[in-house]
């Protein structure tokens, strides 16, 4: 039986402790250890410090549409803005989703009624049309001559978020991720031999001294080997000659942090790196034999650079929005193709219908790219065919 490193009272069998992720699961991390702590401490630290980091990156996780280490979708952003006089939230991928629908109608004359609907999907539009017909003593089949104007609005208001990336709870969580990664690389007894007492106390919030953990845009970090530029990276350099254990963490491809976890390491040499793509879930583990600097250089050079920090933020936001726009265009193209087929009620393209088919798709993609609208006249039958 081994003891929880945070409370020392709870015990569990080797490999049977609470699952701790080297990079938070909420950020897309997958590598984990069950030799660190009990469930109670995991829950407590999760609420006290890990939640701070998760919420700090909530907008980035949403827009990038990351998948958590437990294969869940990122958190929906509530009350993100107002569009067409209605509040909207952001579903994963930065997709605006109206919290409520809007339905208005007015009589033009004794034979005509005009209605206006703001719906979240063709299925919902059909349901509202059915309710509209029923209100006036009709069924949807009675609306054969109805004039339906379908407006797809891509002029989505800008959504603003903030990144603080600091404070004691934030850096305690960063340190916990680093210590957890080390736990995946060494025997569980190494975390309990006294070498990491200061780091453990800092993570718990019990330490009177600040651990040496910081933003780091000075130290030389390994290159990202995965294709996605917002992939996470974490590496450990443990040197028995100096007793130093240095850990570097790069989140979302650009935000770098480092910590000197101990100066009394007595285990073997460790030079390991782990990378994970938070969108695809792809992971990569490798040795750092080619790291061009010594551990003394890493430990002595670690520190922030305000100019490089600002540059990192700008590059990160650019990468996230570029990826979100690319995904949005792909999604819009797919939906436009389905809509074009539904409007024409055909399965095979011909010379006669190809022009209108392409025009529908191009119209939606251009509107998506330039924040415009697409207005079409459709029949009830065409609207029905747009239902998935």
Image (cartoon, rainbow, N blue to C red):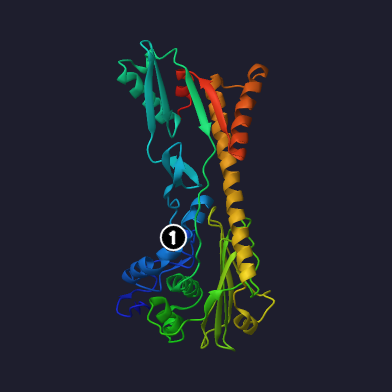
Residue 25, by quadrant, is bottom left
Q: Return the x and y of residue 216 as percentages of the image width and height.
A: 59, 73
Q: Return the x and y of residue 268 as percentages of the image width and height.
A: 55, 83
Q: Return the x and y of residue 250 as percentages of the image width and height.
A: 57, 67
In the displayed structure image, the side of residue 374 where residue 119 appears, left or right: left
Residue depicted at x 48% and y 26%: 386
Residue 331, by quadrant, is top right
Residue depicted at x 35% and y 19%: 133
Which of 52/114 is in front? Answer: 114
Give the quadrant of the N terminus: bottom left
Count of labels shown?
1
Residue 176, by quadrant, is bottom left
Residue 25 shows in the view: no
Q: Return the x and y of residue 112 as percentages of the image width and height.
A: 39, 13
- Which element is circle 1 on? helix
Which of 341/151 is in front? Answer: 151
Taking 216 as reference, is 317 above or below it? above
In the displayed structure image, the side of residue 125 where residue 39 appears, left or right: left
Which residue ends up furthest to the top in the rendered image? 111
Taking 111 as reference, is 85 above or below it? below
Taking 81 as reference, is 7 above or below it? below
Residue depicted at x 51% and y 55%: 60
Taking 340 as reference, is 55 above or below it? below
Q: Residues within 10 Å of mark 1 (few under 14, many from 20)?
A: some
Circle 1 residue: 55
Which of 24/361 is in front? Answer: 361
Residue 108 shows in the view: yes
């Amino acid at each position: 039986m081994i003891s929880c490193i945070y409370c020392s009272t709870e015990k569990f069998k080797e490999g049977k402790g609470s699952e701790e992720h080297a990079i938070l699961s909420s950020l897309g991390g997958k590598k984990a250890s069950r030799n660190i702590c009990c469930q109670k401490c995991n829950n407590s630290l999760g609420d006290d410090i890990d939640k701070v980091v998760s919420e700090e990156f909530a907008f980035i996780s949403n827009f990038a549409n990351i998948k958590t280490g437990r294969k869940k979708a990122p958190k929906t952003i509530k009350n993100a803005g107002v569009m067409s006089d209605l509040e909207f939230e952001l579903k994963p991928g930065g997709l605006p989703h109206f919290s409520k629908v809007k339905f208005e109608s007015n009589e033009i004359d004794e034979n005509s009624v005009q209605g206006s609907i703001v719906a979240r999907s063709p299925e919902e539009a059909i349901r509202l049309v059915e309710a509209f017909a029923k209100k006036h003593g009709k069924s949807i089949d009675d609306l054969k001559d109805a004039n339906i104007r379908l407006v797809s609005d891509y002029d989505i208001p800008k959504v603003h978020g903030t990144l603080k990336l600091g404070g004691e709870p934030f850096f305690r969580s960063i340190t916990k991720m680093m210590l957890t990664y080390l736990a995946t690389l060494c025997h569980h007894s190494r975390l309990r031999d006294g070498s990491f007492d200061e780091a453990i106390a800092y993570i718990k919030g019990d330490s009177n001294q600040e651990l040496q953990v910081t933003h780091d845009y000075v130290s030389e970090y390994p290159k990202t080997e995965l294709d996605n530029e917002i992939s996470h990276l974490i590496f450990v350099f443990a040197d028995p000659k100096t007793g130093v254990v240095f850990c570097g963490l790069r989140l979302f491809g650009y935000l770098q942090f480092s910590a000197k976890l101990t100066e009394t390491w007595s285990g073997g040499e460790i030079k390991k790196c782990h990378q994970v793509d938070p969108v695809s879930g792809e992971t990569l583990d490798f040795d750092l034999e080619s790291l061009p600097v010594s551990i003394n250089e890493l430990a002595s050079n670690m520190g922030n650079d305000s100019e490089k920090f600002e540059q990192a933020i700008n590059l990160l936001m650019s990468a996230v929005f570029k990826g979100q726009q690319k995904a949005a265009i792909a999604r819009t193209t797919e939906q436009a193709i389905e809509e074009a087929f539904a409007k024409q009620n055909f399965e095979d393209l011909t010379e006669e219908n190809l022009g209108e088919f392409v025009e529908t798709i191009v119209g939606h993609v251009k509107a998506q790219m330039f924040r415009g609208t697409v207005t079409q006249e459709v029949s009830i039958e065409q609207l029905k065919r747009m239902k998935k």
